[in-house]
Image: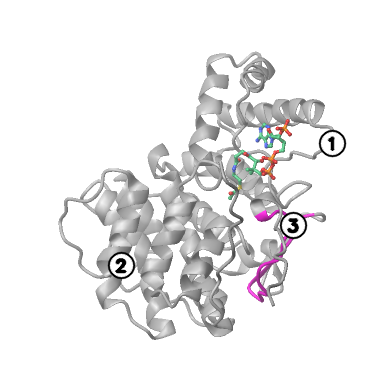
Amino acid sequence: MSQTPWIAPPGLEGVVVADTSIADVDGAAGRLTYRGRSIEEVVRDFRFEELVPWLVTGRRSAPLRPDIRPLPAGPWPARPMAALGAVLLQLEAEWPDDVEAACRLIVGLPIMFGRVVGKGSLPGGDGRSSVAGQYLALVTGRVPTPAQVRALDAYWVMAAEHSLNASTFAVRIAASTGARLPLALAAGVGVLSGPLHGGAPEGVLDLLDQVARRPDDPEAVVRAKLDAGERLMGFGHRVYRTVDPRARALRDVFQELAGEEPWAALAARTEAAALRLLGERHPERPLATNVEFYAAAVLKAVGIPRELCPATFALARTAGWTAHWWEQRREGRLIRPLGRYRPA
Ligand code: ACO
């Protein structure tokens, strides 16, 4: 006997699709925890090299030494997100099954990717500095300051995991079919490449550039965008109905790093104008600052080129994706929803 299928709402909004013990996103309270610890505490206590194994296994260990494999000289795809996907595909054949070995590759991924897209020589990239420091040296071609390294590391810890967002769901779908981890991660990269998910920092930087040309009136710039039917990148979230806690924490990181620079004040005035106008236009739906607004500001302040922002986010998120891949594999059930046929 066939059962009447249940029809999920558009965008699966409000639908729980998995039990997870990796992170909890409390959208009403604006709280994020990783394995039971608040994001503020995790940022204070973990570097990226420590975060990856803890997030994946739940066990705290010493910082992992990155596993860095030699990669061909190229050619690599010109677009950074495609290049990151290609690096994962390149590593596929030799990807280890062991969890700690896989985590060491995840920790090494920023350095391998940095070598592919970076500026050639490797100042500070001698293997003694942190992965964030080596990545910054590779992609900027300069030795970063300790404050810049700390800021990127804090960003990576904050961006590493966010429960069942679109890209993580894609990774879990891949895991449920038995797909190997590097190919599941490549699926995550593809989904994160969309402007409504991981592509927002470039839009935020465009907005700040436009405001910089009319610094006396950020509100006019924001209003013009909304009047043209554009979405303001860096605002709104499917789950948070109040400020995204990562935006709050990254604002502090940004203020510490670039608080004195003129464009820091400009960013703050732009945020205030955007919140005011979004509040006016959508009184029914709180549209607050999301992680991408201050992520863009931090990435600009540490010198990450604009076109590398989404990939720099993806490098952090590989940690969360890996944790979900393992969790989904233990669950073991193929994810296979239905479609409803409706003749055109
Ligand atoms: N700017 C202007 N209007 C917005 C924005 C925004 N940033 N976000 C939502 N709205 C409006 C929509 O136009 C819509 O208005 P309408 O009902 O008059 O058509 C209403 O608010 C509801 O929007 P939805 O798309 O239903 O909200 P949803 O929950 O799907 O949106 C999303 C979440 C996609 C993040 C959205 O807020 C958005 O597009 N933001 C900008 C892109 C962005 O910053 N993405 C990064 C998200 S964080 C991350 O992925 C790591």
Q: Is residue 20 above or below residue 114?
A: below
Left or right for 151, reference 137: right
Q: Position of residue 72 (x, y in %)?
A: 16, 61
Left or right for 339, reference 48: right
Specify start and end residues of the magenta stretch as a single range.
12-27
Q: In the rendered structure, which disc, 2 or 3, sits on the residue that comes first in sequence? A: 3
Q: Position of residue 243 (x, y in %)?
A: 75, 46
Q: Is residue 266 above or below residue 182?
A: above
Badge 1 amino acid: Glu
Circle 2: element type: loop
Q: Position of residue 129 (x, y in %)?
A: 37, 64
Which residue is denoted by mark 3 in the rendering? 14
Q: In the rendered structure, which disc, 1 or 3, sits on the residue that comes first in sequence? A: 3
For label 2, the crowd category at 10 Å Cα-Cα, with few meaning under 14, some 14 to 19 and many 20 or more, is few
Q: How far apart are labels 2 and 1 at the CA level?
A: 51 Å
Q: Nearer the viewer, mark 1 or mark 3?
A: 3
Q: How many marks?
A: 3
Which residue is denoted by mark 2 in the rendering? 127
Q: How far apart are labels 1 and 3 at the CA level?
A: 17 Å
Ligand 1, seen in the image, is in the quarter at: top right
Does the stretch in magenta take in 308? no
Q: In the rendered structure, which disc, 2 or 1, sits on the residue that comes first in sequence? A: 2
Q: Is residue 124 among what the camera can see?
A: no
Badge 2 amino acid: Gly
Does the stretch in magenta take in 25? yes
Q: Is residue 280 among what the camera can see?
A: yes
Which residue is denoted by mark 1 in the rendering? 284
